[in-house]
């Protein structure tokens, strides 16, 4: 479904990714792991078209989208929930959700708002509140709700558990598991290694801009090196 | 002591002028709210629009009020094109560069106007400029009433547009969260240009409403941009309601100041408000919301 081939990318003169390749198959949850500064967000933003890769290819459902603008990737159904939520603080929860359907599924936005209200009852209670007044966890749910409004074909979740309480982290992973069960393809970018690998089919570990390890999630969970570097075990 | 009816009359007159100040300030505050820059070209674009009104009037005999949709549409295209092809292209995404580019654009526009139209004043005379309604305490002429009603109507329409339509929502989204807007697929460059276009269209409308009362010269923009700037600071940068209320406050201040201290000394009141606001409430009356 998504194929990234030998991507070299970065900011200005500075290279962050030195030839990264990665696949996400239909209906798959793929975990992209790595410490801060490994290049995870750089990879996302180059897939979404916020930045243009220096070299390499991004192919989505057979179509070359390397260097495409974010409007194009959204049109194709690649929807990113960015790190730090990026909800619109000056707009109501409802308007935030409606903005999710800015380019896709606009005609079905009323049904989709109802559907998302069902998934996130706490968001539904605050539908007319300004998004800036929500708690961090609620903003994260709103950000995910906004992405679902576009009826994504591939969902990229960038650190969805960051800054959430342990209880909310549990809830977040249960939700991702549910979205997966509903058939959505997900690229899950996380620092939360164990929980991510528990719900993922496959995983990639990014280190210093390169894929250091990859394989089925269960194998990675057993890997000695990974356990040592990320879990201190 | 002044007769209360004279003061009431002065307030009413101030409200009429204030409505146009609001409209000019609305354009400025919208552009500020979205692009986060003060558009230094605001005054010269208003001047250019006023020449547009005069041109239509003098060459084609089009009434300035009937010309409003045409001038506003033309101004929108001008603003959109200016942002998309000049300001946006040269700024490389840095706000302080945008600021200087708008200053440069204003210098170019003024000098072209000076060259093309000379410094002579041009007048747009409507046949009904002394008709009006007698309120008892004061007499309101057609240009005053038209300016008041049209400014309020345009402000209300614009508010509805920003609140209800998808483009309006995208404008609000871009104003506060550009990255988030990009990720839902908003073309941020397009929205910048649309905002600049709408801000300029407000000037186009204001130009039509001002033309019957103010003689047009290449320097006319300065008077209004200074007032509009005060209105925006008073109302709060980026605030719609602030621009509307601020315009009325400044209009009434100017009018009452003129009544008590005479025409030229009365203008001090505006600068006084400006300084007091900066001292005691730098965020303006209605803060930072949009």
Image (cartoon, coloured by chain):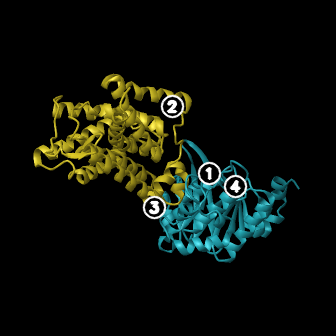
In this rendered view, identify the residue nearer to me: B236 or A27. Answer: B236
Q: Residues within 10 Å of mark 3 (few under 14, many from 20)?
A: few
Supply the letter of whichever chain is yellow: B
Are discs 3 and 1 located on one and the same chain? no
For the question of whether residue B94 can be seen, the reply is no
In this rendered view, identify the residue nearer to me: B49 or B99. Answer: B49
In space, the residues marked 1 and 4 are separated at their CA atoms by: 34 Å
**Quarter of the picture holding the C terminus of chain A:** bottom right
Supply the letter of whichever chain is cyan: A
Are discs 3 and 4 located on one and the same chain? no
In space, the residues marked 3 and 2 are separated at their CA atoms by: 32 Å
In which chain is the residue bearing label 4? A
Sequence-first disc among 3 and 2? 3
**Quarter of the picture holding the N terminus of chain A:** bottom right
Left or right: residue B225 compared with residue A173: left
Q: Residues within 10 Å of mark 2 (few under 14, many from 20)?
A: some
Image disc number at residue A136: none
- Vertical position of residue A3 compared to residue A233: above or below: below
In space, the residues marked 4 and 2 are separated at their CA atoms by: 33 Å
Read off the residue under disc 2.
Answer: B277
Read off the residue under disc 3.
Answer: B164
Q: Are marks 3 and 2 in contact (CB under 8 Å)?
A: no
Q: Residue sitting at 76 percent across and 68 percent down?
A: A217
Whole-percent x and y of residue B268? 39, 24
Are discs 1 and 4 located on one and the same chain? yes
Read off the residue under disc 4.
Answer: A135
In space, the residues marked 3 and 4 are separated at their CA atoms by: 26 Å
In this rendered view, identify the residue nearer to me: A95 or A207. Answer: A95
In space, the residues marked 3 and 1 are separated at their CA atoms by: 42 Å
Q: Residues within 10 Å of mark 4 (few under 14, many from 20)?
A: few
Read off the residue under disc 1.
Answer: A17
Sequence-first disc among 1 and 4? 1
């Amino acid at each position: 479904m998504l194929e990234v081939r030998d991507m070299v990318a970065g900011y200005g003169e500075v290279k962050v990714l030195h030839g990264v390749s990665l696949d996400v198959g239909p209906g798959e949850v793929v975990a992209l792991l790595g410490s801060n500064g490994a290049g995870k967000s750089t990879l996302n933003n180059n897939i979404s078209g916020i930045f243009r890769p220096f070299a390499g290819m991004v192919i989505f459902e057979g179509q070359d989208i390397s260097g495409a603008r974010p409007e194009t990737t959204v049109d194709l159904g690649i929807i990113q929930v960015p790190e730090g939520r990026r909800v619109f603080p000056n707009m109501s929860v409802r308007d935030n959700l409606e903005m999710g359907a800015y380019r896709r599924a606009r005609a079905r936005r009323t049904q989709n708002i109802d559907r998302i209200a069902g998934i996130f009852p706490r968001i539904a209670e605050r539908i007319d509140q300004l998004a800036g007044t929500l708690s961090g966890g609620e903003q994260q749910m709103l950000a995910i709700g906004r992405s679902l409004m576009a009826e994504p074909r591939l969902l990229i979740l960038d650190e969805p558990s960051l800054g959430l309480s342990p209880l909310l982290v549990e809830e977040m992973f249960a939700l991702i598991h549910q979205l997966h069960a509903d058939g959505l393809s997900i690229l899950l970018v996380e620092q939360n290694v164990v929980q991510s690998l528990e719900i993922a089919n496959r995983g990639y570990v990014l280190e210093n801009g390169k894929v250091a390890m990859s394989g089925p999630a269960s194998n990675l969970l057993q890997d000695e090196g990974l356990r040592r570097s990320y879990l201190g075990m | 002591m002044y007769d209360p009816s004279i003061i009431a009359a002065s307030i009413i007159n101030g409200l009429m002028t204030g409505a146009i100040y609001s409209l000019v300030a609305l354009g400025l505050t919208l552009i500020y709210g979205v692009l986060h820059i003060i558009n230094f070209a605001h005054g010269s674009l208003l001047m250019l629009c006023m020449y547009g009104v005069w041109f239509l009037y003098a060459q084609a005999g089009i009434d300035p009020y009937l010309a409003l949709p045409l001038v506003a549409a033309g101004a929108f295209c001008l603003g959109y094109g200016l942002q998309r092809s000049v300001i946006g292209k040269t700024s490389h995404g840095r706000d302080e560069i945008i600021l200087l580019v708008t200053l440069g654009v204003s210098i170019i526009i003024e000098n072209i106007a000076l060259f093309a139209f000379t410094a002579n004043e041009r007048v747009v005379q409507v046949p009904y400029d002394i008709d009006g309604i007698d309120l008892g305490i004061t007499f309101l002429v057609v240009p005053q009433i038209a300016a008041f009603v049209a400014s309020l109507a345009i402000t209300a329409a614009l508010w509805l547009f920003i609140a209800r339509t998808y483009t309006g929502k995208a404008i609000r989204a871009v104003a506060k969260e550009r990255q988030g807007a990009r990720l839902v697929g908003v073309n941020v460059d397009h929205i910048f240009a649309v905002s600049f276009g709408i801000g300029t269209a407000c000037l186009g409308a204001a130009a039509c409403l001002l033309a019957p009362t103010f003689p047009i010269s290449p320097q006319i923009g300065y008077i209004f941009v200074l007032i509009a700037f005060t209105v925006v600071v008073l109302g709060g940068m980026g605030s719609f309601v602030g621009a509307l209320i601020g315009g009325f406050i400044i209009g009434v201040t100017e009018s009452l100041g003129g009544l008590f201290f005479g025409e030229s000394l009365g203008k001090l009141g505006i600068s006084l408000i400006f300084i007091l606001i900066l001292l005691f409430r730098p965020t303006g009356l209605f803060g930072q919301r949009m």
